[in-house]
Image (spheres, rainbow, N blue to C red):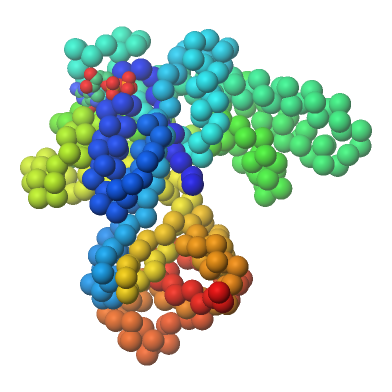
Amino acid sequence: SLTAGIVGLPNVGKSTLFNAITKAGAEMANYPFATINPNVGMVEVPDKRLDRIQELIPAKKVVPTTFEFTDIAGIVKGASKGEGLGNKFLENIRQVDAIVHVVRAFDDDNITHVTNKVDPVADIDTINLELSLADLDAVTKRIGKVTRATKGSEEAQAELDVLNKIKPVLEAGGAVREIDFDEEEQKIVKGLFLLTSKPVLYVANISEDSMSDPEADHYFQAVQKYANDHNAEAIGIAAESEEEIAELDDADKQEFLEAAGVEEPGLDKLIQAAYKLLNLETFFTAGGKETRAWTFLKGTKAPQAAGIIHSDFERGFIRAEVMAFSDLDKLGSEAAVKEAGKLRVEGKDYVMQDGDIVNFRFNV
Ligand code: GDP
């Protein structure tokens, strides 16, 4: 499954955030036996639509879909030169599908900042420079290889063109995600597995005081501006408070949030943002034994979506009976959806839509 890797300089709150994730995950009732790697934190994806579906098409239980974060320890300046844990760090980033980049955005004289100054944008630059340099190294090597291979091959020439488009951007300390590529180029870029081509979410670890209104926090504003200027997303989270919240039961959680003046835990916002970043969407199966949310990659077709539930469903796929969550929500019952002609029968070429409530028909 797809995973987002948490990175950042030392002492910015990565472990605190990862602990919040792990604690939230430990609360998951539906996955008692989920044995996971200590570097992987699994959380449920909060989705209010599940409650509404359960209200209208009651099932014995409700199962949210899940999402994985990976804790990537140990960035150090000079990682791209292989210093310290550098190589391992870069290798670990290569394995993840998106980057959650945590920066310090809280003042606290008791906690040392590695550069002795709280400056989230400078922190972002420090890490991004290492990633750009690592990519530059890879691109330069690749250019050498492909140049030797070209000999009139159209394919090699196309790759070479893309590499030459990327190189100057990296040399200037930029990221591949900031470059505009056409569809053909994009395919080539994907095959290069470059670190700075991965989608990134900047997480400003803000102080508790800013929790109720991150947008007003000047550190967060700086991070958000940086993200906007660099084809990325940003959110503000008070990691320490999130860790406390994650330990509370639902009633206490509600009380804590109300007292802090926030609507939903920052962790929920983080999960949803990371989900979106990875181009993930949700379909539902409803009623009977369980109502359940399932994760699919945007653009997935019906048989492959069926395969997410069980490989037999994909192999024996006949058709999908589909209604949109928005129709069920509006019309109030399955029967009303049917009556309105909004229960569709879809075939093997149907592209799944976020919010589809599906009944797969298949041969066994
Ligand atoms: P890491 O090195 O990035 O994993 O950072 P840690 O999560 O270990 O945090 C470093 C220190 O900062 C710890 O002492 C945390 O308790 C503290 N810390 C983390 N988040 C916050 C926060 O939001 N506010 C304050 N005041 N301290 C925090």
Q: How many marks?
A: 0
Query: x, y (%) of residue 244?
Result: 17, 35
**From the viewer's perspective, is 342 left or right of 57?**
right
Query: x, y (%) of residue 112?
Result: 27, 11
Query: x, y (%) of residue 183?
Result: 67, 49
Residue in the picture at 36% in, 83% down: 337
Residues 340 and 306: in front is 306
Q: In the rendered image of this protein, does residue 329 appear above or below residue 21?
A: below
Query: x, y (%) of residue 322?
Result: 45, 76
**From the viewer's perspective, is 175 left or right of 110?**
right
Residue in the picture at 29% in, 37% down: 22
**From the viewer's perspective, is 263 left or right of 178?**
left
Q: Quadrant of residue 271?
A: top left
Q: Is residue 215 visible?
A: no
Q: Quadrant of residue 34?
A: top left
Q: Quadrant of the C terminus?
A: bottom right
Residue found at the far bottom of this picture = 339
Q: Quadrant of ligand 1?
A: top left
Q: In the rendered image of this protein, does residue 159 appear above or below residue 139?
A: below
Q: In the rendered image of this protein, does residue 333 appear above or below residue 191?
A: below
Residue in the picture at 48% in, 57% down: 296
Residue in the picture at 51% in, 55% down: 297
**From the viewer's perspective, is 120 left or right of 60?**
right
Residues 185 and 321: in front is 321
Q: Is residue 4 visible?
A: yes
Q: Quadrant of residue 119?
A: top left
Q: In the rendered image of this protein, does residue 98 appear above or below residue 171?
A: below
